[in-house]
Every structure is written in C-alpha cells, then in structure tokens.
Amino acid sequence: MSRTTTVHIDLAAIRENIQTLRAPLAAHRFMAVVKADAYGHGAVRVAQHIESMVDALAVAFTEEAVVLREAGINAPLLILEGPHTASDLALAGKLNLWPVIHSDAQLEWCKTLGADLSRAWIKLDTGMHRLGFAVERYADIRDTLLSYGIGEVTAMSHLASAEEPDDALTRAQLQSWEETVCGGPDSTSLYNSAATQHALSSPSDWVRVGYALYGGKIKGLPGPAPLRPAMQLTSSVIALRQVPTGGSVGYGGRWTAQRDSVIATVPVGYGDGYPWGAADGTPIEVNGQIVPLAGRVSMDMVTVDVTDCLNLSLGAPAVLWGDQPAIDDVAAHSGTIGYELMTRLTPRATRVYHT
C-alpha cells in the first residue's frame, strides 16, 4: 500500500511503563486498564503482551471482556461498569469475570446468580456522583453479596480530581473513603493513574492504571521516572507548495502567510482521528524538526508551515504525535485531552506493532 499514514504501537514501551509504575507500588496489586481497545492500542495485543506482568486487567463492559476471553486471555478481568443486564451477570459467572456492583438492580440479579461469581467489586460513591452506592450502605451490601454465595468482595471508588490531592473534593472523597473502609476485612481499590503518582495514605490494595500505562502524562504531575509513549502516529509529505505573503491556506482561509512561505501537505486528517479542532501552531515533526500546523485540519490532510526546514523533499517523514510532539501537547493545542486522541483513531491508519 502506498499511503504512509501509520499508527506504531510499541508493546515494549508498555511493559517498561508497567515496570516503572510498579516499582514504588510493590505493596499493591496492579490492575492494567485495557478498556476502549486498550486506549486505542489494541486490547488483545496489549493484553497478550502484559498478562504475565499484572495481577488483573480491567475493561469497561462485558463485550470488551468477551473479546479478551475469546482471544485466550485468562487473567482476572474486572468489568468497570458492571453488568448492564442479568444475562451479563450470568456471563460473568461463566467466564470468571469480576463485575462491579453499583446499583440495586445489579444487587437483585446477584440474588440468583451471585453463587457463580468468584469475586464482586462494590462501587461506592464517595463524591463523584457518577456510579456507586452511598457509602453508609457499604456494610449491608457487603453482607448481602456474601450471603448470596459470592466468594470475595472488594470495595472500590473513583477520585474525581486525583491529580489534585489538595483539592477540596479530593479531600472530601478521601475522608469518606477512609471512614468507610479503614480497618475493614475486604480488599480495597481507590488509586487510578493519577493517584498512584501521589503519596496518598488512603487504603488501596489494588491500583487501577490506564492512561499512564501507555505513556500519557497526567495533568499537573511530574510522574515517576519518565514514561515512554507507546503510540506514534506518522505519515509523510506528499506535496510542497510556495505560498506568497498574504496567501491563505485550507478551508476558510484560516491561516494567512505573513511572509513568502513553503507549505507541506501531509495525508492525515480527522478521518484518521487527528483532531479537527487543532489550532494553527499545533506542533508536528517533519524531517526531525518541529513545525507548526498551518490551516484547518481536513478529513484526509493537514498543511504545515515548513518555510524554515532546509533540504525538504517529497516523502519526508512526519510525526503527528509520539516522542515529539507528545500527544498531550497536541491535545492542548486542540482543546481536548490525550485520552481522547488515543481512543479516537480510526481503522484507516495502518497499525504496526513493535516488540
């Protein structure tokens, strides 16, 4: 195939990131979150590569878990949204999945299906108000689930602003969590990617790590030892044009040349998942040099100001994100977050895996 737009997935980088993240967390059990097709990296390939390194995997819903089981993944699998229907819960028992129980409807399904579950996780709403039982119901729900024959239970919650440990909401959630689970008999899980990078003292036997696995930077955090980005979106230059001073480029003529300029066209666009909202000046690496986006992103192409690039020719390599520029930098120029860019890539761009 002649189109060069490619998503490179570095599986070795994910393994290295796990080792980096686990080093200060030796006392905790480590769960790798592979929902949303492993944040766009390919859930089956990622799970196959890291299964032996982690204590469990997590996905969002039952269908994602079924894909992994059918691919031969035998690691414990947590269903973060829990069962959507009673049949989902029955499948959890059949496939040895760990469902999150966060509603009275799910609790009712457990009455007849719970005996087939080796473990269930109780989601507690400590203040995010998205999913979960009121914390004061924890003891009763725990006892109810165990009476239904479920083997073990784990208490879990989710921090709304884990990257801001001094935030009033974070402090309130931590207080609620500690008052509910401290000294209890069950295993616990509170920490996500951001929380693992703070010295939080709240109990969390399990850590659930997603974005950081793939080298994403958590807002406002320096992080542990540097994490390696596991995804690189690349392409190449297919056209070079001279644009005179005052000439405009792209839809709506958004970018106007302030000098006689050279514009490179790169065949990647929002049809591939590159953000339509990327502003002029969004960094792109062309032939090893960071240059600015010039003009509105098209479905299939972007245009870049390469006036200051020397000896540039057709076919020159372009990196939309990876080591440089970082995906979070591109996201910041596009009014979004790196999580969205990772997970929005379409199948048009060829995926190549590196081990």
Image (tube, rainbow, N blue to C red):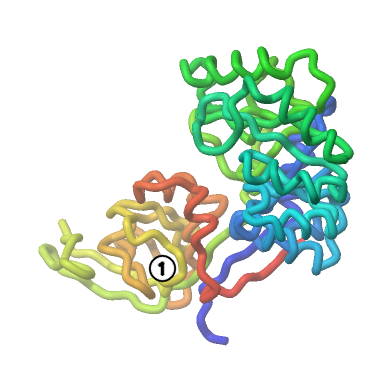
Which residue type does callout 1 highlight? Answer: Asn
Residue 203, quarter of the rendered image: top right
Residue 205, quarter of the rendered image: top right
Is residue 314 depicted above or below 305 in this figure? below
Q: Which residue is mark 1?
A: 311
In the rendered image, residue 18, in percent from the top left (x then y), is placed at 76, 42
86, 2: nearer the viewer: 86
> Left or right: 34 with respect to 91?
left
Judged from the image, the secondary structure of the residue bearing numbered disc 1 is: loop
Q: In this view of the protein, can residue 25 be seen by the observer?
A: no
Name the residue furthest left: 246
Q: Residue at x 42, y 48 (%)?
A: 331
> Left or right: 131 with respect to 290?
right
> Left or right: 82 with respect to 146?
left
209, 138: nearer the viewer: 138
Dot 1 crowding, Cα within 10 Å, few <14, some 14–19, many 20+ = few
* Quarter of the C terminus within the rendering: bottom right
Name the residue furthest bottom: 1
276, 258: nearer the viewer: 276
